[in-house]
C-alpha cells in the first residue's frame, strides 16, 4: 500500500504553481491548494485522480492562513509545502505607494513566513518535511521597474535560508527556486509594461529579452516545476538552504 503523502501548495491555480500541483498529483500526493480562486485548478487536478481540497484567499489575509493550517491539521500531516503567490505590480520605486508596500509585504513576506512558522511544530513532530518557495532571478540580479519584487523576494530568500539552518536538524529541508524568464502571464505583463513605458511593441521587448538568455528562448512553467517537485519529494535528501536558478543560463552569463 502506498504511503499517504500530503502537499500544501499555495499560488497553485496557474503558471508554475499549477504545473507543480499537476506533477505532485501524478506522484500520488493528496493536495491542499490555495489561490484567490482554486475551483478550475482543482477540477483539472482531479482529472488525474488526485484528492484535492481548495482554500481560496490571499496569503496576506490571516483568515486564509488559519484555514490552511486547519486543513493540514485535519489531514494530520504535511510532507511538502510550496510557498507561492501572485506577483506584485510592475512599478518603479517612486510610483509605489505606502499602501502598496504594506499590502505586498503582507502577501509576499509576512504571509509565507507566518504559514511556515505556524506549521513548523507539525513538521518537527514528524521529523520531516520539504519546503520550497518560488522567488525570482531578480533577487541576485535586480531589474529596474520592479522594486516590490526585487526587495521582498530577497527578504524572503534570506529568511528561509535562516530557517533552513535552524530547522535542518528536525528533518525540515527548505529551499527557494529562482525562475528566469518563464512563459507565464507574469512575463507577458512585465514586457507589455516595459513596451508601454518605452513606446515600442511588446514583440520588440520579447525579442530583446530572449537575446539576454543564453538558451535564446523563454522557459516553460514545467521546466521550473520539475525541479520544485524533486525538491519537495523525499528524493531530495541533502539539498537545503539553497536558492537555485532555473533561468536558461541568464545569471551565469552576467
Image (tube, rainbow, N blue to C red):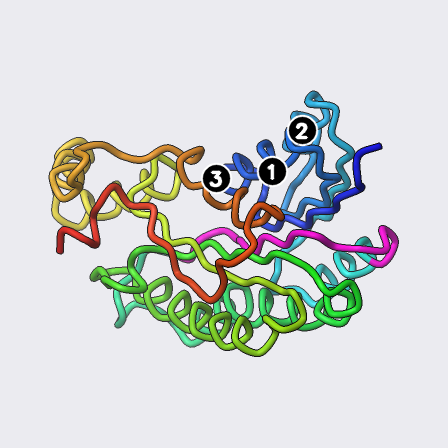
Counting residues from the start of the chain, the first of labels 3 and 1 encountered is 1
User: Considering only vertical position in the picture, is 192 above or below 22?
Assistant: below
For image coordinates 22% across by 32% down, the residue present is 217
Q: Can you tell which mark lies on residue 45?
A: 2
Query: In the structure shown, which secondary structural element does the residue marked by tag 3 occupy?
Result: helix
Residue 155, picture quadrant: bottom left
Image position, residue 224 (x, y; %): 42, 41
Left-right relation of 15 to 29: left
Quick one: label 1, few (<14), some, or many (20+) residues within 10 Å?
Answer: many
Q: Position of residue 233 (x, y in %)?
A: 60, 46
Q: Is residue 238 above or below residue 155?
A: above
Distance from disc 3 to disc 2, alpha carbons, whole Å, reads 15 Å
Q: Residues within 10 Å of mark 3 (few under 14, many from 20)?
A: many
Q: Secondary structure at mark 1?
A: helix
Discs 3/2, front: 3
In this figure, which residue is indicated by the disc labeled 1?
A: 21
Determine which residue is flagged by label 3.
Answer: 225
At 63% from the left edge and 65% from the top edge, which residue is drawn? 172
Q: Which residues are magenta?
A: 73-88
Amino acid at each position: 500500500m502506498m504511503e499517504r503523502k500530503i502537499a500544501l501548495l499555495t499560488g497553485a491555480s496557474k503558471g508554475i504553481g499549477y504545473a507543480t500541483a499537476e506533477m505532485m498529483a501524478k506522484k500520488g500526493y493528496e493536495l491542499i491548494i490555495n489561490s484567490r480562486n482554486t475551483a478550475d485548478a482543482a477540477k483539472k487536478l482531479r482529472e488525474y485522480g488526485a484528492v484535492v481540497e481548495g482554500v481560496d484567499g490571499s496569503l496576506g489575509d490571516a483568515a486564509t492562513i488559519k484555514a490552511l493550517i486547519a486543513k493540514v491539521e485535519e489531514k494530520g500531516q504535511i510532507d511538502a509545502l510550496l510557498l507561492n503567490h501572485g506577483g506584485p505590480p510592475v512599478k518603479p520605486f517612486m510610483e509605489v505607494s505606502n499602501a502598496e508596500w504594506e499590502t505586498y509585504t503582507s502577501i509576499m513576506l509576512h504571509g509565507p513566513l507566518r504559514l511556515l512558522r505556524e506549521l513548523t511544530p507539525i513538521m518537527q513532530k514528524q521529523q520531516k518535511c520539504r519546503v520550497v518557495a518560488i522567488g525570482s532571478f531578480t533577487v541576485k540580479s535586480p531589474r529596474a521597474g520592479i522594486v516590490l519584487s526585487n526587495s521582498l523576494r530577497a527578504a524572503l530568500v534570506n529568511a528561509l535560508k535562516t530557517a533552513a539552518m535552524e530547522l535542518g536538524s528536525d528533518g525540515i529541508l527548505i529551499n527557494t527556486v529562482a525562475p528566469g524568464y518563464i512563459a507565464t502571464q507574469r512575463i507577458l505583463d512585465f514586457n507589455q509594461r516595459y513596451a508601454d513605458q518605452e513606446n515600442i511593441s511588446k514583440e520588440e521587448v520579447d525579442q530583446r529579452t530572449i537575446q539576454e538568455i543564453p538558451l535564446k528562448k523563454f522557459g516553460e512553467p514545467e521546466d521550473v516545476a520539475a525541479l520544485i517537485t524533486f525538491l519537495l519529494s523525499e528524493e531530495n535528501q541533502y539539498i537545503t538552504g539553497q536558492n537555485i536558478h532555473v533561468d536558461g543560463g541568464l545569471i551565469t552569463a552576467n
